[in-house]
Image (cartoon, helix red, strand yellow):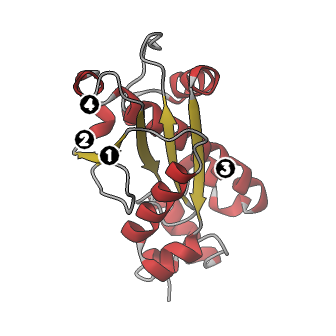
Amino acid sequence: MLNYEKKYEGKIIAGIDEAGRGPLAGPVVCACVVMPLGQRIEGINDSKKLSPKKREELYEKIIEFAIDYSIIEVDEKTIDEINILQATRLGMKKALEGLKIKPDIVLIDAVKIDTDLPQDSIIHGDALSYNIAAASILAKVHRDRHMVELDKKYPEYNFAKHKGYGTKAHIEALKKYGKCEIHRESFIKNFIN
């Protein structure tokens, strides 16, 4: 988990990841974080490998210990306008620009972004880099919390349960109630008339 951090030892390392590229509704959330490597938080891993309870615990620790962090939401309208990959890149760039300190190197999960800073795009980076894994937890918890809040506004879709992903129940709700304003038009066209 620290191989990439060791590779860039002595440098200020920022990790970037996203949550929510695949759902039918809601934003894609991008997080950028600079973690202190001297006081490592036990349990940090790819957010997909952690239970919701563990992610919540680690989220609070990451916020507390991070040297700097930034979390950005890119809404469904932007996703529909420029496509999910470009929306993800835009969110990652804005999350990086949201830092108060300037990192020496940016480690990113699987994509490259438009920045003058040196970057290392790492396939499965959220499982290989401590900083990217921390960013993945920030993005995932932030997005899950956001979808729970949206569930209060749109209870018929049950966003609190599936977080906007294309589950059977979500698709059935789409067919029954039609779309709401947080659905991604480009993602749901096969499910509604």
- Label 2: state its secondary structure: loop
Would you say the residues marked 4 and 1 are in contact, meaning their CB atoms lie under 8 Å apart?
A: no
* Mark closest to the chain's N terminus, 3 or 4: 4
User: Marks 3/4: CA distance?
Assistant: 27 Å
Q: Is 101 drawn above or below residue 76 in the view shown?
A: above
Please indicate whether residue 5 sits to the left or right of residue 137 in the image: left
User: Marks 1/3: CA distance?
Assistant: 22 Å
* Mark closest to the chain's N terminus, 2 or 3: 2
Q: Position of residue 144 (x, y in %)?
A: 59, 44
Would you say the residues marked 1 and 2 are in contact, meaning their CB atoms lie under 8 Å apart?
A: yes
Mark linked to residue 146: 3
Would you say the residues marked 1 and 3 are in contact, meaning their CB atoms lie under 8 Å apart?
A: no
User: Marks 2/3: CA distance?
Assistant: 25 Å
Residues 44 and 11: in front is: 11
Would you say the residues marked 4 and 2 are in contact, meaning their CB atoms lie under 8 Å apart?
A: yes
* Mark closest to the chain's N terminus, 1 or 2: 1
- Give the quarter of the image for residue 53: top right
Residue drawn at x 44%, y 13% as measured from the top left = 40
- Give the quarter of the image for residue 183: bottom right
Type of residue at label 1? Answer: Asp
Residue drawn at x 67%, y 75% as measured from the top left = 181
Residues 23 and 135: in front is: 135
Residue drawn at x 21%, y 45% as measured from the top left = 123
Residues 49 and 174: in front is: 49
The residue to which callout 2 is attached is 124
- Label 3: state its secondary structure: helix
Type of residue at label 4? Answer: Leu
Q: Is 75 drawn above or below residue 58 in the view shown?
A: below
